[in-house]
Amino acid sequence: MASRPVFVAVGNPDHLVQEVPVTFTWSPGFAPIQKKKNVAAMHEAARIAGLEPLLEVSTKSEEKLGQRLSAFNLKIETPAGTISIESAYQGSKVFEKGGPYTDLYRMDSRTAKKDERIKNSGAITGFDFFGQKWPLVPKTAFYDWLYLSALEPHEDFLKRLYVYEGFTDIEFNPGKSLNCQARTCALLVSLIKLGALKDALRSQGDFIAVVASDSFKQDHSAELRQRLLL
């Protein structure tokens, strides 16, 4: 058995995204067909719990919209040209022993994510995106900002996401990762419903102010929250 979160757009200024854990039978293996089996099993368990329809946001999604919204496929315009969200994120990391490795901007998403320097440069200390520095806290702020900045020009098109009760990413393991494209999609829907997307993206300070309080309401923030309190 496995447990993974469904991310629900709450649409409340004080609580933008809710995590709903769903338990289902896990099919082991790395083949795409196994991943799709797990998506189907998770969505069926969520349906029984009253959460449907859901959108899987990953390259394993059965829906083209979910595939297009994957950080591996989604692109953002930058001073270095058009690059994927994944490459932008990896190439902006600053570590104790190096970075940002901006040559990753020119690489495809998978190559950028697997670059050995990402694993061997010590602890991550922050982000540097074309000279704009981002802190580690709020924990997903930089990733969310990148993702939402790429999507903001398509706000009207993205209102079609309203039909979904929640968003999933079968690759996301809350025990191992913080950032999740499905969570960011739920954040996007909340901000659009509140009419706050453009205001949130007006500046770095505005964005951090919008997402800061909600960042610590997520279930997998418990350990980080505890460390900050100590």
Image (tube, rainbow, N blue to C red):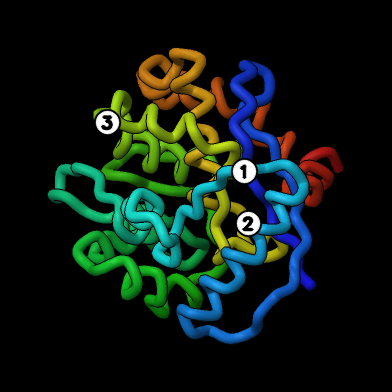
Return the residue nearer the eye: 108 or 160: 160
Return the residue nearer the eye: 15 or 189: 189
Side of 161 relative to 226 (left or right): left
Return the residue nearer the eye: 75 or 5: 5
To which residue does mark 2 refer?
A: 43
* Residue 100 seen in the current view: no
What residue appears at the point 78 percent right and 42 percent down from the top-left corner?
A: 225
Residue 39, quarter of the rendered image: bottom right
Residue 145, quarter of the rendered image: top left
Q: Residues within 10 Å of mark 2 (few under 14, many from 20)?
A: many
To which residue does mark 3 refer?
A: 154
Q: Residues within 10 Å of mark 1 (few under 14, many from 20)?
A: some
Could you say where residue 185 lies in the image, as x and y percent from the top left? Answer: 48, 40
Q: Are marks 1 and 3 in contact (CB under 8 Å)?
A: no
Side of 181 relative to 11 (left or right): left
Amino acid on which disc 3 is placed: His
For the C terminus, give its image quadrant.
Answer: top right
To which residue does mark 1 refer?
A: 52
